[in-house]
Amino acid sequence: MNIVAIIGIGVVGAVLSQLIKQYKPEYGLFVSLGTGILIVGLVVIYVSPILTGLQEFVDRSGMDRQYGAILIKSLGICYITQVACESCSDAGETAIASKIELAGKISVVLLALPLFEAIAKIAFQLIEG
Amino acid sequence: MDLVFKIATIGIIVAVLNQLLIRSGKEEQAMMTTLAGLIVVLMMIITEISTLFDTIKSVFGI
């Protein structure tokens, strides 16, 4: 996790986008989007060992493998929607950013639906038992 | 890293070209070059975004 490189890229990107914004405002947005994508790409490469460790931890704890997968998937969805939301609001389009956020929330809830059913089933068993 | 510098150089070149064309009285061509520069940068960004989303999909197993 070369944090110094990431900080360098971020600062250089910010300076470049401000520089270009004076002449051509739309290119400023492109430069910041490009830097954002570069940094997110770097971070995703470093995240994968964490995910495998998480999956092993979930398996060792005896839980169903499916719950670990749902956990990691929702993490991925939140990650992507956050990237999109930030770049949209950076461009000034806060309305679009909130729509993307709404879609992200709904997709995570949709993903976690089987968990709710499992909890409901357990609760009913407790009540009747 | 070269992506950021590429986009920055394209932006600067288009800006300079634009000023040149406007000074020489050819406003339509100035708009044309801006549009062309915009499309070039957009294509580069879109390919980068697609590679990013593919890696995220493969890493998170979505």
Image (cartoon, rainbow, N blue to C red):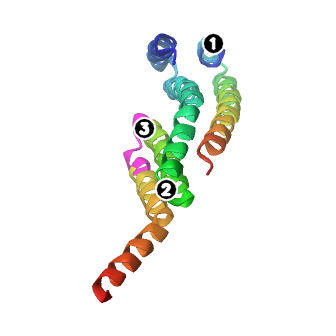
Q: Mark 2 points at which residue?
A: A62
Q: Name the residue under label 1.
A: B9
Which chain is disc 3 placed on? Answer: A
Q: In this view, does B52 lie to the left or right of A86?
A: right
Around disc 2, counting alpha carbons within 10 Å, would you say few (fewer than 14), some (14 to 19), or many (20 or more)?
Answer: few
A67 relative to A20, above or below: below
Around disc 1, counting alpha carbons within 10 Å, would you say few (fewer than 14), some (14 to 19), or many (20 or more)?
Answer: some
Q: Name the residue under label 3.
A: A86
Number of the label disc, if any, that sits on residue B23: none
Q: In this view, does A14 lie to the left or right of A41?
A: left
Around disc 3, counting alpha carbons within 10 Å, would you say few (fewer than 14), some (14 to 19), or many (20 or more)?
Answer: some
Mark 2: which secondary structure?
loop
Which three-letter amino acid code belongs to the residue tagged 1?
A: Thr
Which three-letter amino acid code belongs to the residue tagged 3?
A: Glu
Q: Residue A126: in sight, yes or no?
A: yes
Mark-to-mark CA distance, 2 and 1: 55 Å
